Image: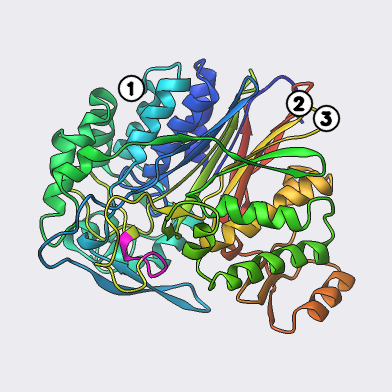
Amino acid sequence: MTKNAAGVAAGHALTAEAASEALKDGGTAVDAAIAGLWTATVSEPVLSSPGGGGFIMVGHRGQTNCLDFFVETPPQRPSGDIDAFVIEADFGPTTQAFTIGNGTSAIPGFVHGLFAAHERYGRLPMEALVAHAASVARNGFTINAFQAFLFSVVAPILIATPSARALFADSDGKSIRPAGSVFRNPDLADALEEIASEGIEAVRSGEIAGMILKAQADGGTLTADALAAYQPHWRTPNEATVAGARVFLNPPPSAGGTLIARMIEENNNTANLSAMASAMAATDRAWSESGRSLQRFLDLQGPNHKVAQRGTTHVSVIDADGMAVAATVSNGEGNGTIVPQCGFMVNNMLGEDDVNPDGVADWQPGIRLSSMMAPTLASDTDSGLAVLGSGGSNRIRSAVYCVLTRHLAGQRPLEDAITAARLHIENGFLEFEGHISDDDRAALEAQFPERRCWDEPNLFFGGVHAVRKNADGGISGAGDPRRGGVFVTV
């Protein structure tokens, strides 16, 4: 543990490096998170994009606020045909169908969110926070093994169109760039610098907005009015208590924070594996009683919102002054088309079955979509402060709950809490990682006749990146090895 320092945990070394540089230059934790997220659009392009959205939880001077800049349905449905088609992503043991195409894109909020967070909490100029990302995009970086694996999983999306193939395909034009190859994206570098200079007007009404609409011309849902109408929202977090610690969770319309709060309600004081599994099972049953629909689950607790899941990445930062930030973003998987001269895809959130069970054209206009994303802040009885979050689709809720419970109730260091075996229960079926004791395994097997044991830790169970700061200034944390995570101190 390092004293009187700041810390960053993220899903890629370059993302963490950008955040660290912002801290070294005198930036706040929000500045650092913003710099990291800009770089994530370059170094983690399957998970992050200016065409996506997300959430930022900020703890500062005793106040905690959550910024919702997730995607939103357009104000009106298109009158013509929409462009949407299904691809199969290969996860190895199983495949999953994704719907992509121009007609699957909701209004992105990523850029709006970063500027809104910067306006309230930033110190460094936005041009400085974009500089690292632009440099990496222009000069290139070496694709690591984890990113290469992600590319291979969603390869049908990354080669779905000529524009995507030109960016992601190897020299043969058919296979995805492998690990060890250099990935350059100079168009994205130019776009990021333009956004930093022009602000949100670049994606509301500027040249980049025009390029987004040009990419949407063939069967898309977005219009100039739709891009101009988007607004991020600051929300008051939900609160829960774990072993005496105050936990701040992403509020509705987020589903992830709501479900984590329900698990905490069921068990908030023991890290016993069986008790944790029981809490997950009870939440799963409550979900089932709502028709196993997150839509209905949220309807019981607030306004009508729809729910989006899928690919995500996360950045956690605590600075030397104690400002704490948890930021989680997603682009879905991307819609398959690169925005001309901009180097990024817009999201495919409207193509998700859980959002639109009746088809990609069936959505309610002007609705902020919900998400499993759950950036979280915890303040414990010893005046310690921790921030964490995860990728992992609908496993985000169980990943965050497992780490929170083990760290706070089990008093395990963050690194141990993150690497410990994960559980997830869906439709009454238990998924669990097998690096547990024989007694714990026997207890779980007795509880859950329907189950599957994973022999090794797996990215299926999310990727929790977390940072903690104690009252004495000691800093610790970890990036989740399941998703190539890194932790650095500054």
Q: Quadrant of the N terminus?
A: top right
Decide: is 168 above or below 125.
Answer: below
Give the number of the mark in front: 2 or 3. Answer: 3
Q: Residue at x 73, y 46 (%)?
A: 415
Disc 3 target residue: 382
Tell me which corner region of the image, top left, top right, bottom left or bottom right, holds residue 489. Answer: top right
Magenta region: which residues? Answer: 350-355
Q: Amino acid at mark 1?
A: Glu
Name the foreground residue: 469 vs 253: 253
* Percent x, y of residue 386: 69, 36
Magenta-drawn stretch, dominant element (helix, strand or loop)? loop
Secondary structure of the residue carrying tag 2 is loop
Residue depicted at 33% across the width and 22% down the height = 127
Q: Which residue is mark 2?
A: 474
Crowding at mark 1 (Cα within 10 Å: few <14, some 14-19, many 20+)? some
Q: Amino acid at mark 3?
A: Asp
In the image, residue 155 lies at what x, y percent?
35, 67
Which residue is farthest right? 439
Q: Are marks 1 and 2 in contact (CB under 8 Å)?
A: no
The answer to which of marks 1 and 2 sits earlier in the sequence is 1
Residue 215: percent from left, percent from top: 15, 52
Q: Position of residue 384 (x, y in %)?
A: 76, 30
Q: Earlier in the sequence, mark 3 or mark 1?
A: 1
Which residue has dot 1 on it? 127
* Type of the residue with mark 2: Gly
**Image height of 341 relative to 484, above or below:** above
Quarter the C terminus occupies: top right
* Figure check: 105 above or below 174: above
